[in-house]
Structures are given as structure tokens and as C-alpha cells.
Amino acid sequence: MAHDEKVRALVRRYYVFDRFTLEQSAQKADVSFGTARRWKAQALNKGDDWDKARDVHIMAGGEVNMISQGLLAGFILQYRTTMDELQQNTELSAKDKVMLLAALADSFTKMTAASKRILPEVSELAVAMRTVELFGEYIHQHHSSLMEPFIDALNGFGQTLNEEFKK
């Protein structure tokens, strides 16, 4: 059975924005799981990565901050515990302690530098995706007759976003 682009867009919306599994998204849109899987693969071949879009949407919702804070808190806790153990360990020579402290400081520096390099790109993509989502909601509420052309344009625009943020 052939489905129109609205149904395909609906499956994508359920998967990306509503965070249903692909199987649940297919069921909710009344299409087979195989069809949804094929659509997702076809979109990926055209540059529209549903999984990446889903991740960005989650990040745009603020969950990335909670994850980042959790990871950072866990690292700092391990860092502090290791520092305390090194200070209390009387069996290690001063030379060994210095080497271990240097390695620990290096790990901390690398972790903070990596997050600074990664987060700006993720943040930009998250803002772009959130803007597109808000614009889609606006069109749906105020100019519903333009939804179909908007969805058509969005399919190609996904590839543009993907290319722009892969740099």
C-alpha cells in the first residue's frame, strides 16, 4: 500500500520529536514496521539522519545539560576520591605520587577541553533544529494549508543541515 508524504512525515515526527521507538512510530501512523524502517534508511541516504535529529532534539530540550552535569559530577567525584587516596597512601613514593597526580591532572584538562570543543557545535545544531520545530508548529497553527509544502521543503533541508554541521 502506497502512503503519502504526510504519513512518512508523521512517522518521522513520532520517532524524532515524540521519542517513540521506530516500531511504535510505525504503529501509531498505521504503517508496517518494515515500511518505517525503509523510510528511515531512505531518509538517511538523502542526508536526513533521524537518529541524529532525535539526539539533537533531546539536547535542545535541555537533557544534554543534565547528562553533561551528571558526567562532570561523576568525574569530579572520582577525581576527588583518587586525590584523597593518593594523599593518604603511604606506600607510594613521592615520585610515583607526582606521576599519578600529573596523569590525573592531564585527564581533567583533556576532559574539560573536549567538552568545550564539542558543545558549541551541538548547541548550534540544537538551536537550528528547535527553530525549525517551532516554525513548523507556527505554520501548523496559523497557516495549516502550508504544512504540505513545508514538509516537502523540510525533507531537502535536512540534508542541508546535515552538511552544514558535519564540518
Image (cartoon, rainbow, N blue to C red):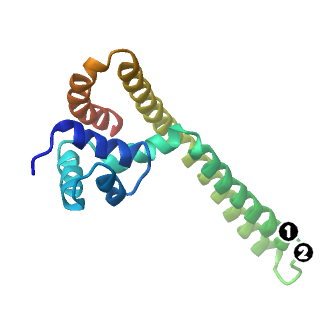
Figure label count: 2
Location of residue 52 in the rendering, given as x and y in whole percent from the top left corner: 37, 47
In 3D space, how far apart are the residues under numbered discs 2 and 1 (Cα atoms)?
6 Å
Q: Which mark is residue 48?
A: none
For the residue labelled by badge 1, is the local secondary structure a helix, a strand or a loop? helix
Instruction: Give the farthest residue toward the top.
Output: 142
Label 1 crowd bin: few (<14), some (14–19), many (20+), radius 10 Å:
few
Q: Nearer the viewer, residue 75 or 98?
A: 75
Please name the residue shown 18% across and 37% down the image: 5
Location of residue 36 in the rendering, given as x and y in whole percent from the top left corner: 23, 54
Q: Nearer the viewer, residue 49 or 74?
A: 49
Q: Is residue 98 above or below residue 121?
A: below
Q: Which mark is residue 84?
A: 1
Instruction: Choose top left, top right, bottom left or bottom right for residue 144.
Output: top left
Instruction: Give the farthest residue toward the bottom.
Output: 91
Residue 25 is left or right of residue 56, and the answer is: left
Mark 2 and mark 1 residues within 8 Å of each other at the beta carbon: yes
Q: Amino acid at mark 1?
A: Asp
Q: Amino acid at mark 2?
A: Gln
Location of residue 14 in the rendering, given as x and y in whole percent from the top left corner: 37, 46
Residue 34 is left or right of residue 132, and the answer is: left
Please name the residue shown 33% across and 56% down the image: 22
In the rendered image, which residue does mark 2 sit on?
A: 88
Q: Is residue 41 above or below residue 99?
A: above
For the residue labelled by badge 2, is the local secondary structure a helix, a strand or a loop? helix
Please name the residue shown 33% across and 51% down the image: 28
Residue 34 is left or right of residue 128, and the answer is: left
Location of residue 109 in the rendering, given as x and y in whole percent from the top left corner: 64, 51
Instruction: Give the farthest residue toward the left.
Output: 1
